Amino acid sequence: GSRAELASGEKWVCLRRISDKVPSLEQLNIEKNLVKAIRDAGHRHGLVIVCGGTGQGKSTTANAILADYLDRLGNVAMTIEDPVEFNLAGERGNGGYCFQVEVDGEEDWAPALKRALRWHPRYLLVGEIRSGAAAAQVLRAAISGHLVITTFHAGSVDKGLQSIIQVAETEIGPRAQELVAEGLAAAFHQTLTRSGLEISYLFTDPSGVDPARQYIRAGKLHMLNSFMEQQAIRMAGGNIDQS
């Protein structure tokens, strides 16, 4: 909930209902080959970013991805959000268990993330990154054996990556670019249309060596667009490997 007092003196409250039912990836009408690639990424560690504009369903997609991993692969997850968007708490699917933490202020994100890592969760879901300290903790988690799913307000995949680098740089300096390149597992940009979700996507190679990481390290993020187009063509032919 959110409360505000208007200039007229009126007091208004806005409430958002928390749903008990997280939609499946299929219910989001995500294309089959992309669903397979997303599920394959659940076996990896690293950073999964869901980008988009306000009201484009970023949190819904991020929660659907996490729920799918817990239901299919099991293990432990923690979510850190402001506010909690979906009720994922407790046992899920094939031996999965989720703990949910709600933070109240921007300064609470980094300490909450630090505490969460002490629980050694397999998966972390972090609501939209808002501070350099939180971005730094997310990147450290992504390169230390966790799979971190987060959302970011951005108009495209490359702009989302640029934004997270810029935010993290306020805390850890130029090393942020290297950590994003090293830690990135996948990035999505989505837009809601009348016919459903339109998603552009980027998957890095689990081996750690691929053009996408090289472009990020070199600061040539604009080059990612042509790489993503080639990757989409390969995926349409069933030729993308996320093992």
Image: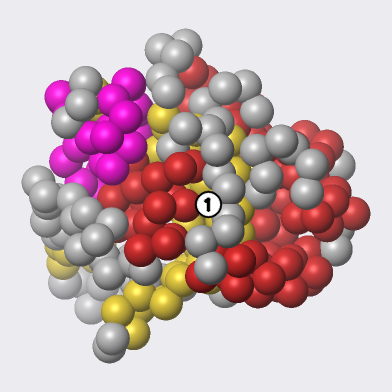
* Residue 182 seen by the camera: yes
**With 105 as the anchor, is 7 left or right in this view?**
left
- Name the spot of residue 167 as percent of width and height, x first: 68, 49
Residue at the bottom extreme?
Answer: 194
Residue at 90% x, 54% y: name it. Answer: 218
Residue at 57% x, 22% y: name it. Answer: 145
State the count of labels.
Answer: 1
- Name the spot of residue 63 as percent of width and height, x first: 30, 48
Tell me if residue 241 comes above or below residue 124 in the rendering: below
**With 227 as the anchor, is 233 left or right in this view?**
left
The figure's colour scheme reads secondary structure
Q: Which residue is mark 1?
A: 49
Residue at the right extreme?
Answer: 218
Tell me if residue 51 comes above or below residue 125 in the rendering: below
Residue at 71% x, 36% y: name it. Answer: 207
- Name the spot of residue 56 as percent of width and height, x first: 37, 72
Q: Is residue 87 magenta?
A: yes
Q: Is residue 166 magenta?
A: no
Q: Nearer the viewer, residue 138 or 10?
A: 138
Image quadrant assignment for residue 8: bottom left
Disc 1 crowd rating (10 Å Cα; few below 14, some 14-19, many 20+) is: many
Q: Nearer the viewer, residue 42 or 11?
A: 42
**With 158 as the anchor, is 11 left or right in this view?**
left
Image quadrant assignment for residue 121: top left
Question: Which residues are drawn in magenta?
Answer: 67-92
Tell me if residue 52 comes above or below residue 181 in the rendering: below
- Name the spot of residue 237 as percent of width and height, x first: 53, 68
* Residue 110 seen by the camera: no
Amino acid type, residue under disc 1 in the picture: Ile
Q: Secondary structure at mark 1?
A: strand
Residue at 58% x, 58% y: name it. Answer: 239
Quadrant in which the C terminus appears: top right
